[in-house]
Amino acid sequence: MALVLNEEQNMLKESAQGFLSEHAPVAQLRRLRDERSELGYDKATWQQMVELGWTGVLVPEAHGGLAFGHVGMGQVMEENGRTLTASPLLSTAVLAASAINSAGTEAQKKALLPAIVEGSLLLAVALDEGPKYRPSLVKTSATASGEGYVLNGEKQFVCDGHIADKLIVSARTSGDVGDEQGISLFIVDSSAPGVEIERVYLADSRNSSMLRLNHVALGADALLGEIDGAASLITYLSDVANVHLAAELLGMSQEVFERTVQYMKERSQYGALIGSYQGLQHRAAHMFSEIELAKSVVIKALQALDENDAKLSLLASVCKAKVSEVVTLVTNEGVQLHGGIGMTDELDIGFFMKRARVAEQQFGDRRYHVQRFASLQNY
Amino acid sequence: MSDLEQFRAQTREWLEANCPASQRLPVMEFEDKCWGGTKWRFVNEDQKNWLDVMAERGWTAPDWPAEYGGGGLNKEETKILREEMYRIDARPPLFSMGLSMIGPALLQYGSEELKRQHIPNIVKGKIWWCQGYSEPNFGSDLAGLQTRCEDKDDHFLVNGQKVWTSYAERADWMFCLVRTDPDAVKHAGISLVLFDMTTAGVSTSPIMLISGNSPFCETFLDDVRVEKDQLVGNINQGWELASYLLTHERAMIGNMGHTAASEKSLHQHAIDVAGGLVNGQLGDTALRTEIAQWEIDILAFELTQERIDDETKAGTGTGATSSILKYAGTELNKQRYELLTDIHGQAGLAWEGEAFDNGLLASQWLRTKGNSIEGGTSEIQLNIISKRILGLGQKG
């Protein structure tokens, strides 16, 4: 498949760009941070995203969605990266929608997918139990009880946990901590007795939380996918997450790069624009070349999601590893090339650097994916 | 069956019938690639036959016009031919600067007579072309070149010195940048001329490289007579042509980063010689990480080649892409050989002896150091990206 966008995908990208730059620029995230917003996102903006159809991009038409696919959604994510717009888009419309659509029962799909599309239901995915992504390190337990299960344990760094109506939680139903097998996914009401959610503040001013589960009683219908056999679903979910996070990081890389080059054309020192100095030009040109490589791995991995490519996991790891490397370079250089002003909170560049580092960590950092790539290639 | 499907089926059948088995083996040595020309010694009959049957159909230059001996294929058909050759690991029947550089320039800028004289011979691999660009004092600053070309009414007279001429001693003809107007601003006084290397006054001297090989020569031009009809394009249009040619050269050199399907992967080299697998992983875990990072980068590079190609076809894209590919591709190729020699340890640095392929790897490793110098250094590519794409560079 040609590594270019088709006309509809291009239109979606352009409309996302227009909407976000007008209604949800970086200034919005700054305001949410400064006001210590309780929700951590702007409700009116989210409502408009719903009206634009973004919550239905990955949902089949039979469940009220647009079935527009991952390449299209990736463009929306990339544009969200350019504006750092805070919203439940990734947790709800990308991750939860993908998980339910891929593994849900007909009843679960019917109950949840249309509500996601309408924007009336927010979900969060709770896999981590530590600061690094290690999906097999699951201590949280689910024990059979009557027809259903009882959940006990603690989940960490749950993105959008404190605003979610429901949580998709990984829990151990057999085996030992560290085993890939024996893990199951459950859909838990955030208002259920025994569920305790504590918001945590990370550097990126986006939503994160700690989740405690104390004897949370679930019905049999809370199980998402196979009992004991969530490993492949978790792998798929993390591939989806990493590719879309990479799309977001690509948007951020481009935005920081463009702002930095613009600054090089405005700032004078020693009587000349700093952009006229070769020592700085070459650093900018190197970044440009690296961003070109990042663009290619992102579109390829997004296509792999849509085509259910047998190499999806490999391409997702290539994508997250490469884009993480590039965004680290570009945000660090972005601050350095802005000089002192780059260190100020007044300039937006710092917001990009902070968001980049959090997004890099989510679902595995660069080193994690470099190692995973080697393992997938059998060496 | 659509026309293209039919073309694919026919091509597959024809290639199966006509590509000799020996021409489907990986290229191991320089001579395994056929460069053609009057002085070429074919390594075997197969190599000659493969060139002849492909050239007969014009498939050495599949997308060139059939009226000059090219294949006359459209883009889709050319792609199918490449895919079908790739499928059976067929070697390209001919490598040459005629195909990759001067041919495309002649088709774009040459007179009808020049096309008729040279293009069919390029397609058939009859002439080995070399490039006369750099001079001892003008490398990166190519436009400063000083080789003089005087108008003597019925002919040109060329005097000067060229350097880094690839295989000048094997070459039949040179395409050469010369100064035709010494008074013009430097870019504006350059022309491109063609001459036979056996012309009186042309002499060459090989340059020994750090790799132990002499792929390049110095070429001395003393009162060399060049016929007037061998001027390509207009007088003083040479810089435009040179830039056009350099774009082709960059694409070619950048492509070195591309791993051929038949080539052994870096991690396989490491498994074979650097301690093998321990519990399914390379025992040398630091090496494992470096190889994985490189393999991720090369995949990203190959996807970028593909994407830029697709964008060109779709009529979108950013421009100056040959500089990006040249820069990224050559730096990756250098890294590849650094890792390869590391993997092989001291055996990778062996210089002689049959047990060590006569020092082939060490020689290849050293040769790659030139990748980021020839065809415009990495620094020149970064200059081009800065100025042409990013618009950096204006003072004050």
Image (cartoon, coloured by chain):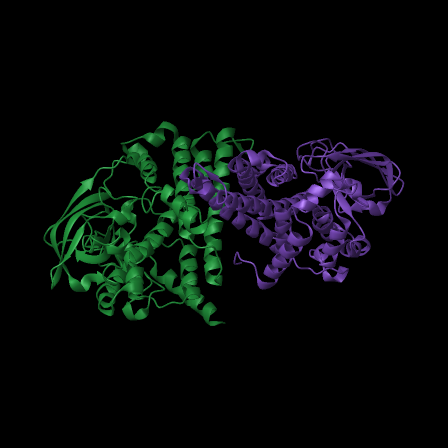
What residue do we see at 23% from left, 48% from top? B145
Q: Position of residue B321 (x, y in %)?
A: 43, 52
Q: Position of residue A258 (x, y in %)?
A: 53, 47
What residue do we see at 84% from left, 47% from top? A221
Q: Position of residue B155 (x, y in %)?
A: 12, 61
Q: Position of residue B207 (x, y in %)?
A: 21, 39
Q: Compare residues B123 and A251 and report the one nearer the observer.
A: A251
Does residue B260 appear in this view?
A: no
Does residue B75 appear in this view?
A: yes
| Vertical side of A136 occupied by A3: above or below | below
Q: Compare residues B343 and A249 and report the one nearer the observer.
A: A249
Tell me how many marks there are.
0
| Vertical side of B347 occupied by A88: above or below | below
Q: Is residue B4 left or right of residue B249?
A: right
**On the image, which quarter does residue A67 sit in?**
bottom right
Display colour for chain A: purple
Q: Is residue B199 left or right of residue B324?
A: left
What residue do we see at 23% from left, 47% from top? B165
Q: Quadrant of the C terminus of chain B?
A: top left
Q: Compare residues B2 and A81 and report the one nearer the observer.
A: A81
Display colour for chain B: green
| Vertical side of A264 occupied by A214: above or below | above
